Image: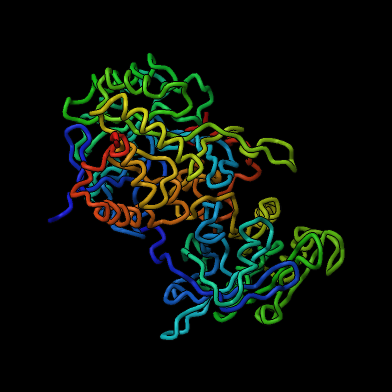
């Protein structure tokens, strides 16, 4: 069954706070919160009932909390970039939105003890905090690296910092933390912490750079990919990326249901604008 | 008195007139989490081709005012994989199935029709001769009455006479009613009106087309008046042919508009992207709207906007 626990619901916004360049929003979502796994996302209708924006917007779930009988909540970190996200972040507390979720794949949680390195770019750090809590609760070592173009675009809430063993910040302009990119600091962190697995979320170019490092050190890399999406539920075929399957065949696959979390080694990187050679059914 | 919501395409009767639109319901499985697909009049599958096809590169999508452009390029697993996986799943879940087929050549249409003629459990064939996302617009069979009828004839020759054939037409033509007539002469029982309109969006930051394939098919509420017009024109020319209406339907009222223009049934496409339960919501609203207006059957409302008033 695809998206086995997904449902469409009217969700109430119970908190909406500006945090740096982003908005932190909390939604009352009832029972669906109990099915959320780190890496899952939701799709939200934007613009109200007479909206000219016909497509849902997809957001990675930052954290979820199941509160039993009193219903669950999910938290999102939204960058007000386009008209849809600007509309969403402008809504007052008490507004309702149409929300579908939880959708997509989640980060694999190892059963054995591991030393995990979590790497986020910009608001791509959002789903990593929920993941850090789960990993930490199971007794794993969790180190985190967050990168952005500038300090104001690093999303790192105080309580999030407490759920990791160490936190490294990088900025392209040097306004916070290390002057540089996340890929500049990864080799040293991997070596120093003897890391077993990397989890990442952020822009595709960043994920590609991390993937190359993961291959070099022969460690597992699970990444949450992004490609422009119309439906989020697997029916529109717009969000495809080339992934190599176990049989060795490359297939254009939907990042909404085959992802967003995929094994970095499966991704044929830097293929935007073309179909990689060897893809099933390539022209 | 009970309301008769059933409709007919060719010799096949469907319990209600609300179908999915080809390419907007995946393989059926994706929507099964959100509603019981037996509730649909029929599932119209994505257009299937002879061989596996990767489709076009990304970006494949651009949102537009009240609509979107897509440039999928008929991505699909090819007919054999489709028959091995998708059809058995739909049958197991008791969906009524309309298989949509697309080809690059007339021979492809003949081949696909022949292959499907020996498969049980298919309620009708939709012959997609109007996909705009092909490398060569010359391949859009539905842009010319001669090539359109050649594709339909190739299908008709290879399936039993009892199998309804629905020809899916493009609105990007001068006179859609003439294309419709030629398809009917070639053996089509019904027409699917309309496919997407060819469009383009240019990103003003990169100053390049937003889609990797440059052009894409425009769908959504933005094209609904074009669909209503096309249905009305074809219904006026061909009073007794089946018409499956589509193009931006997102409410029961939108569906009613197409029925009044002359559609015997409707397909929900882009609305499903924004709301996974759209087909079922629309079905409920359409039935209520028809009853509110005093119709005792769907049939009475088909083409009602064509009546003369004094």
Please count the marks in the image.
0
A29 on left or right of B237: right
B161 on left or right of A237: left
Residue B105 position, x and y percent, is 40, 19
Between residues B188 and A30, which one lies in front from this camera angle? B188
Q: How is the image coloured?
A: rainbow
Q: Is residue A177 above or below residue B228?
A: below
Tell me what residue is drawn at x 51 percent, y 35 percent: B217
On the question of residue B190 being in view, the answer is yes
Tell me what residue is drawn at x 56 percent, y 78 percent: A14
Between residues A106 and A8, which one lies in front from this camera angle? A8
Q: Is residue A149 above or below residue B137?
A: below
Tell me what residue is drawn at x 60 percent, y 65 percent: A88
Q: Farthest top residue?
A: B146
Between residues B172 and A234, which one lies in front from this camera angle? B172
Residue A165's quadrant in the figure? bottom right
Residue B278's quadrant in the figure? bottom left
On the question of residue A243 being in view, the answer is no
Residue B171's quadrant in the figure? top left
Q: Farthest front residue?
A: B310
Q: Farthest left residue?
A: B1
Tell me what residue is drawn at x 54 percent, y 40 percent: B69
- Rendered-image quadrant of the N terminus of chain A: bottom left
Residue B185 position, x and y percent, is 27, 18
Residue A156 position, x and y percent, is 71, 73
A117 on left or right of A97: right
Residue B222 position, x and y percent, is 51, 42
């Amino acid at each position: 069954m695809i998206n086995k626990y997904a449902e469409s619901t009217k969700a109430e916004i119970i908190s909406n706070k500006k945090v740096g360049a982003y908005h932190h929003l909390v939604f009352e979502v009832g029972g669906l919160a109990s099915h959320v796994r780190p890496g899952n996302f939701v799709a939200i209708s934007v613009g109200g009932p007479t909206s000219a924006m016909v497509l849902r917007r997809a957001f990675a779930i930052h954290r979820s909390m199941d509160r039993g009988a009193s219903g669950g909540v999910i938290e999102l970190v939204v960058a007000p970039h386009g008209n849809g996200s600007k509309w969403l972040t402008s809504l007052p507390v008490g507004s309702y939105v149409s929300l579908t979720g939880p959708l997509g794949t989640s980060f694999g949680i190892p059963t054995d003890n591991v030393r995990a390195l979590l790497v986020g770019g910009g608001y791509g750090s959002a789903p990593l905090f929920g993941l850090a809590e789960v990993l930490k609760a199971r007794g794993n070592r969790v180190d985190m690296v967050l990168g952005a173009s500038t300090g104001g675009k690093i999303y790192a809430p105080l309580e999030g910092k407490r759920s990791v063993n160490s936190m490294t910040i990088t900025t392209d302009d040097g306004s916070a933390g290390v002057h540089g990119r996340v890929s500049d600091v990864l080799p040293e962190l991997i070596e120093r912490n003897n890391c077993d697995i990397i989890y990442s979320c952020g822009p595709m170019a960043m994920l590609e750079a991390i993937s190359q490092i993961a291959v070099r050190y022969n460690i597992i890399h699970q990444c949450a990919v992004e490609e422009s999406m119309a439906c989020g539920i697997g029916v529109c075929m717009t969000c495809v990326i080339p992934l190599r399957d176990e049989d060795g065949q490359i297939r254009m696959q939907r990042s909404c249901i085959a992802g967003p979390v995929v094994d970095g080694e499966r991704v044929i990187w830097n293929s935007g604008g073309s179909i990689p050679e060897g893809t099933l059914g390539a022209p | 008195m009970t309301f008769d919501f059933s409709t007919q395409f060719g010799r096949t009767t469907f319990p209600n007139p609300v179908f999915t639109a080809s390419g907007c319901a995946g393989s059926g499985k994706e929507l099964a989490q959100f509603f019981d697909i037996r509730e649909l009049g029929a599932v119209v599958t994505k257009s299937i081709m002879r061989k596996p096809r990767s489709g076009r590169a990304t970006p494949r999508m651009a949102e537009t005012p009240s609509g979107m452009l897509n440039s999928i390029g008929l991505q699909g697993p090819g007919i054999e994989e489709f028959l091995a996986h998708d059809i058995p799943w739909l049958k197991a879940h008791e969906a009524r199935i309309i298989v949509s087929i697309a080809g690059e050549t007339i021979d492809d249409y003949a081949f696909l029709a022949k292959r499907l003629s020996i498969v049980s459990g298919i309620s009708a064939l939709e012959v997609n001769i109007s996909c705009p996302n092909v490398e060569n617009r010359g391949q859009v069979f539905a842009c010319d009455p001669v090539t359109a009828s050649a594709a339909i004839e190739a299908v008709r020759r290879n399936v039993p006479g009892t199998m309804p054939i629905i020809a899916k037409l493009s609105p990007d033509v001068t006179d859609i009613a003439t294309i419709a007539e030629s398809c009917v002469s070639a053996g089509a029982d019904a027409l699917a009106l309309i496919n997407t309109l060819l469009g383009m969006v240019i990103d003003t930051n990169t100053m390049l087309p937003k889609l990797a394939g440059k052009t894409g098919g425009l769908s959504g509420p933005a094209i609904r008046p074009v669909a209503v017009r096309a249905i009305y024109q074809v219904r006026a020319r061909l009073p007794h042919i089946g018409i499956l209406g589509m193009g931006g339907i997102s409410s029961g009222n939108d569906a009613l508009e197409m029925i009044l223009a002359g559609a015997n049934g409707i397909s929900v496409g882009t609305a499903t992207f924004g709301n996974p339960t759209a087909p079922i919501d629309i079905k409920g609203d359409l039935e209520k709207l028809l009853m509110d207006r005093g119709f005792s059957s769907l049939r009475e409302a088909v083409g009602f906007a064509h009546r003369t008033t004094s």
